[in-house]
Image (tube, rainbow, N blue to C red):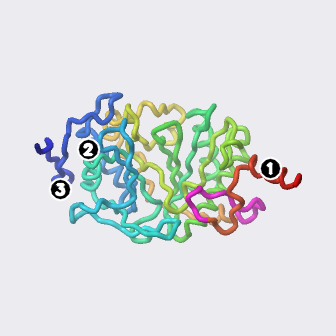
Amino acid sequence: MASPYIEIDAAGRTVKVTNPDKIYFPGIGATKRELVEYYLAVGEGALRALRRRPTYLKRHPDGVQTEEIYQKRLPPRHPDWLESVTVRFPSGRTAQALCVTELAALAYCANLGTIDFHPWPTRCDDVEHPDELRIDIDPQPGTGFPEARQVAFVVREILAELGVTAFPKTSGNRGIHIAVRIEPRWSFIELRHAAIALAREVERRAPTLATTSWWKEGRGERVFIDYNQNARDRTIASAYSVRAKPHAPVSTPITWEELPDVDPHDFDIRTVPRRFAELGDVHRAIDDASYSIDPLLEWYAKDDRGDEPYPPNYPKMPGEPKRVQPSKARRSTSEDDHT
């Protein structure tokens, strides 16, 4: 028997939504239909974050309590109007990824069970030169959103000294993401080096609060600034993405003026459309200016610590230190000394 379905208008295109009453978010009883309607309600803002970016899909076709499908390739069977772009992975392999161009793409992907969208920091017409620096503020055990908030304001202070305007959002969990539009003329390696330099300056100014340690054993109860989110093929949930949790939280753009009093639990699939209807996209000015990362690259060049480890799925990169936990490296050295 055919699955029940409805048809929804998405900015002039008709999108079929199958099994619309299936519960996707059991914590609040929200359905698949509500997921699709959510992305239509915040479409202007969601498209601002995703438009013409290679985008990966984090899918839960049977709801958030089932195993995820992290899909980097565009589904082989898709409408003719859905666009794609060739991206290159760190391994050198390539794939056709979704290139978001219109609101109907979000509705179509939500019908596939896409909960959150993970865009590259590049545009589809130039996938080798990022136009966004991403600061991922990630609380570690013993810390939470209050500590992430403190770190975010240190980031803002540093960027303001460089004449840069940055845009914060909740991560949809315990963290904070900060986006900076940059001129698309640097490589992914340079972008990552800029992120390392910025993270190290935050750590210097707030050493008991923030850390750049890639290895968890070195972080302690501090907030990690994940510079590796700026490496090729690494993505974070976009602005307005729902997150795959039972209560359907949303990665929500906020203003710096709001941040002191923000509670990320207030933002979910039902509250954010009301907020959007009232305020519109509070990041509507994000594309008004783009900035140079040269000052951050100068900081990086002057720092004799050099590079930091890459994620484990990357090939060994030029200038990268040993990709081994410090405690294991010490143990290995000690064993060598006694042989």
**Please, what is the three-letter code of the amino acid marked with disc 2?**
Val
Q: Give the residue type at disc 3.
A: Arg
How many angstroms separate mark 1 from mark 3 (CA)?
60 Å
Whether pointer 1 and pointer 3 mark residues with C-beta atoms closer than 8 Å, the reply is no
Q: Nearer the viewer, mark 1 or mark 3?
A: 1
Question: Which residue is painted at 39% across and 67% down in the image?
Answer: 95
Question: Which quadrant does the N terminus fall into?
Answer: top left
User: In which quadrant of the rendered view does residue 101 lie?
Assistant: bottom left
Residue 296 place in picture, x, y as percent: 65, 61
Q: Is residue 308 magenta?
A: yes
- 1 or 2: mark nearer the eye: 1
Residue 71 in the figure: left or right of residue 11:
right
Mark toward the start of the polypeptide (1 vs 3): 3
CA separation, marks 2 and 3?
14 Å
| Residue in the picture at 71% in, 60% down | 321
Q: Position of residue 106 (x, y in %)?
A: 29, 52
- Magenta segment boundaries in residue numbering: 299-315
Looking at the picture, which amino acid does disc 1 mark?
Answer: Arg
Identify residue for label 2.
36
Task: Say if 87 sits above or below 109 in the image.
Answer: below
Q: Which mark is residue 330?
A: 1
Query: Secondary structure under badge 1?
Result: helix
Return the residue nearer the eye: 260 or 235: 235
- Badge 3 element: strand
Label 1 close to label 2 by CB (< 8 Å): no
Reading the chain from its start, which is encountered first: label 1 or label 2?
2
Q: Residues within 10 Å of mark 3 (few under 14, many from 20)?
A: some
Residue at 59% across, 50% down: 226
Q: Which residue is mark 3?
A: 13
